[in-house]
Image (cartoon, rainbow, N blue to C red):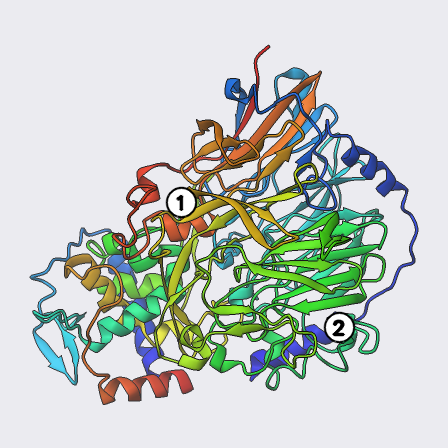
Amino acid sequence: MPIRMTLLAVTAGLALVAGLGSAYADDKAAAAVASDENGKYADKDGNPTFKIKEDGTVDWYTYSGFRRFNSDCFVCHGADGAGSSFAPALADSLKTMSYADFLSTVAEGRKNLKNGNDKVMPAFGNNKNVYCYMDDLYVYLRARAVGDLPRGRPAKHEDKPPAAKEAEASCMGG
Amino acid sequence: MRVHKNLIGIALATTAMTFSLAGGALANDDLQGLISDSKNWAIQTGDYANTRYSKLNKITADNVKNLQVAWTFSTGVLRGHEGGPLIVGDVMYVHAPYPNTVFALDLNNDGKILWKYEPKQDANVIPIMCCDTVNRGVAYGDGKIFLYQADTTLVALDAKTGKPVWSVKNAEASDGSKGESGTSAPMVVKDKVIVGISGGEFGVRGALTAYDMKDGKQAWRAWSMGSDKETLIDPEKTTQLGKPVGKDSGTNTWEGDQWKTGGGTTWGWYSYDPKLNLIYYGTGNPSTWNPSQRPGDNKWSMTIMARDADTGMAKWLYQMTPHDEWDYDGINEMILADGIEVGGKPRDVLVHFDRNGFAYTMDRATGELLVAKKYDPAVNWATEVDMDKDSKTYGRPKVVDKYSTQAQGEDVNTTGICPAALGTKDQQPAAYSPKTKLFYVPTNHVCMDYEPYKVSYTAGQPYVGATLSMYPAPNSHGGMGNFIAWDAAKGEIVWSKPEQFSVWSGALATDGDVVFYGTLEGYLKAVDKDGKELYKFKTPSGIIGNVTTYEHKGKQYVAVLSGVGGWAGIGLAAGLTKPNEGLGAVGGYAALSDYTALGGQLTVFAVPE
C-alpha cells in the first residue's frame, strides 16, 4: 500500500520537528501554486495546495476534500471546518498548522485531556475513507483557511484527473 | 475479510442467552409506587408511558410568571448535557456527560453533596461518540442507581452510598476499538435493567439487552438484525402490520453479510406497558449512510419494536423507513396514551414522532397502524405513508424520486431534502397531557443536501459515506425549530411556535396547565396550553436536557440541565451553511455561538412564597 507507507514515513519523520513548537504561519502567498502535476497543485515548497480560478472554479482535490470533510470530519469539526462546541474550527487551525503537522495529527490522532472538557481526536491512519484522501482534505482546509474559499459546496470544479482516479482505485482497493 | 470474520465470532459468542421466568417483580412494585407519586421524578421519562406529564399543579399558568431560580449546581463538565436529574424522596441524582460523574444531592440540606461517583474510563471512547460525549441520565430501582457509561459499562451503585454493587460491560470492546458506546438512559422493568447501544455511524450492530437487577447477569439480548434466534423473532408469531414477518427477515433483507455491520442501534428512550408486559423502543439507521452500498430493506433498522419484557421476544415490529437513504434513525421515544379516539373509537395507542418527519399513532397491543402524518409541513422526502391495507406497499412511505438519494445515486448531490439528517425531531422527548389530550413536541426545522459515496468498513472507524450540508427550512420563518402541539388522533398540528434554533430539549407538561421546554440559546420557557409564552429565563448555557418537576417539603420545583453540545452543538455552534436563506419572522439566522457558551449546570426554579 504505497500511499499509506509514504504517509506514515512522512509523519514519523516530521513529527519531531512539529513537537518543537516552531511557530508556523500559512498565508495566501505561501499557498500560491508553483507547480501542476496532472491537476494536482503544489506550492513552492512542494506541499499540496489549492487553485481557485477567478470564476470560482476550484481544483478537483479542493472539491474532493470538501466532500470528504463534510462526511467523516464534520461530525466533530462542524460543517465546512467552522468548528463545533467540542472540536476546533479547522478553517482557523490550518492558518498555523503545517502540512506535516496536519498529516501526523490525522494519522495518529490527538489527546487534550482537560478536566471537564476532555478532547480526543481518533487516529485515522488505518481508515481508508480518510487516508486515501488526506491531501484532498488538506488542500480543502488550506483553501478555507488562507484561500478565501467560502463555506458550502464549491459551485464549479475541475474534472477529476485520471491520476486521481487511479490513486483512489489503488488506495481504496488495496 | 478479516474484519468480517471477527464479527462472525462476536455474533456467535453472544447468541447464548437465558430466558428468565416472569417473577421477582417486587422491586418493580416499589419503583412503580415511587413513579406514581408525582412528588418524585423517579424515572428519566417521567413514567413508563414516557408522557413527561406531572400531576403537580402548584405552579400554574397564572403564577408561572413569578418563577425564580431557587438554587443551581455545576457538574464541572463542559460537554453536551442531555437527560435530567432523578428525584427520589429527599435525594436528587444528577449525572454528567463523559466522564459520567454522578452526584447525590441532599434536598434537605440545600443540595449538599451526599456522594459523588466518577468511573475510570478509557479516553479512547471519546472520539467514537459521533455526536458529543452525551449521556441521557441514570435510572433508579431496588435501592440502586444504574449508570450506563460512555464505555458501555453498566454499573449499579448503592443509592445511599454511591458504592458500586456490580458492573457489567455491555459491548464487546470498552476501549472504543469497535465503535460501540453508551449514551442512552437505562430503564428498570420488573427485576431487569434494559440498556441499548450507540455507534450507528461506526457500523455497530444494535441490540437491546436486559440484565438482572440483582447481579448484572444477562437475561436476554435482542439484536436489531441477524438470525431469528439472535433477533428474538418468531417468524410465525411476530407480526408486522398484522402479518407474520416470516423466516430470517433480519438477514434476507440485506446483501450478503452486510447485516453484521448493519447499524440499527438502540440509543433512544424505552417505554413499558405493564398490562401488556411489552417494552417499546425504536432502532437507528442502517450503516453506511450510502444507500446504494446496501441493497434491500435492511431490517430491522428504522423499526418500532414491541418486545416481551421477560423474554425479549418480539410481539410486533414496524419498519417505518425501509432502506434508509437520509439517516432518519427511528430511535425517538414511544409515548403510550390511553383512550385516544381514532375513527370514533377509543384506542390505547403508541405515538411516535420519527426523525423522518412522520408522527405515527399505532394500536400498541397489535401494532396496527392508525395514523401516519407529517408533523412539519416542510417534510418532502415522501408524500405520505401508504394507508391502504390492500396495497402491496401498505405501511411504506411513498418516496419522492427527486429527494431519494438512492434514485439520484452515488456521487450525486441530492438537494433540498426535508428534514435534514437531524430529523424533524431527534431524541429530545415530547410530552403528553392526558388533560388536553395533546402532545407537545420539540422539533427541528432544518433541511439538507446529501451526497452519498462509496466507503469501506474499518472496525472502530466512522462508516458514514455521505456528504451533508444543512440549512433552515427554505420559504419558512427562517428559524430552525418549532415547538408544536399535536393531535395524534387526527394527525394534525394544533399550534406551532417558531424558534430561532432547533428545540433540542425534552418537554414537560403539568396539571398546572403549563408546558415547559428549553432552547439552544439557554432559555427555559413556559407556555400555556395554546402555546402562549408565559415565562422565560436564560440559563448559563444552551439547553439540550429535559425539563423535570418535583415537590419537596410542599413546594413544587422545576429543574433542567444546561450545557450546549450534542448533535446540536455540531450542526449549530458555528452556524449552518447558506446563512442568508429564509430570513423571516423569527429574525435573521445567526450562529449559536453568538448566544451561548459551554457549561454544565443544573438550574432549579420555584415560585416564591
Q: Considering only order in the chain, which callout, 2 or 1, is on the residue closer to the N terminus? A: 2
Give the CA separation, mark 1 to mark 2.
41 Å
Residue A100 vertical position relative to residue A158 in the rendered view, above or below: above
Tell me which chain the residue with mark 2 is part of.
B
Tell whether label 2 touches label 1 (CB within 8 Å): no
| Residue B97 seen anywhere in this rendered image of the structure | yes
Q: Residue B332 in the image: x percent, y percent?
A: 60, 55
Q: Chain of mark 1?
A: B
Q: Amino acid at mark 1?
A: Phe
Q: Which amino acid, by three-letter code, is at mark 2?
A: Glu
Residue B179 sits in quarter: bottom right
Give the structural element (helix, strand or loop) at label 2.
helix
Where does residue A37 sit, x and y in percent of width and height?
15, 83
Write down the residue under mark 2: B230
The residue depicted at 24 percent of the width and 59 percent of the height is: A151
**Foreground pick, B557 / A9:** B557
Res. B112 visible in picture:
no
Q: Going 85% across and 36% down the picture, which residue do you hit?
A: B30
